[in-house]
Amino acid sequence: MSKKTEPPAPDPLQPWIQFWETWSQSWSKALSDTAASEAFAESMGQHAEIYLQATALVRRQMQEVMEQTMHQMSVPTRDDVIRLGERLTHIEMRLDDLDAKADEVLDRLKAMA
């Protein structure tokens, strides 16, 4: 007896899959060509520059508001902490210099004795 082989059942999604593959390939090529163009690069550069200018303005305004709020709450701002750190660094350097000079004076006194 010979077995009859049945043809595979048709896939109802096959037209959609073919459409999707064709569509994505055409869009991929179009978008790649667009992204590689000089006009696109210039346009993106202009948009990035405008965005950075706008965010700088917002950042400056937020910083001013935060500083006012922190001063009203008697909390040190970033600039206050930086200035304090710089002053402490200068004090530490002066103490190191004084320590070195004191060691020098002690060495001379020991040498005289």
Image (spheres, rainbow, N blue to C red):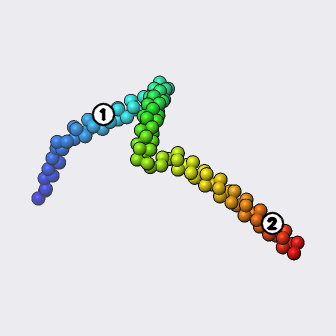
Dot 2, how many residues are within 10 Å of its Cα: few (below 14), some (14-19), or many (20+)? Answer: few
Kindly report which numbered mark, 1 or 2, lies closer to the viewer in this rendering: 2
User: Residue drawn 52% across and 47% down?
Assistant: 80
Circle number at residue 14:
none
Which image quarter: residue 30?
Answer: top left
User: Residue drawn 48% across and 46% down?
Assistant: 77
Where is residue 93? Give x, y as percent: 68, 56
Circle number at residue 105:
2
User: Residue 89 vs residue 12: left or right?
Assistant: right
Where is residue 41? Give x, y as percent: 48, 29
Where is residue 26? Give x, y as percent: 35, 32
User: Residue drawn 69% across and 56% down?
Assistant: 94
Q: Vertical placement of 72 versus 47: above or below?
A: below
Residue farthest to the right, as pictured: 112
| Nearest the eye: 8 or 12 | 12
First in sequence: mark 1 or mark 2? 1
Q: Amino acid at mark 2?
A: Val
Q: Which residue is mark 1?
A: 23
Q: Quadrant of the N terminus?
A: bottom left
**Does the CB distance between marks 1 and 2 fall below 8 Å?**
no
Q: Quadrant of the C terminus?
A: bottom right
Using the numbered discs, state the Cα–Cα distance from disc 1 to disc 2 in whole angstroms: 86 Å
User: Residue 53 vs residue 89: left or right?
Assistant: left
Residue farthest to the left, as pictured: 1
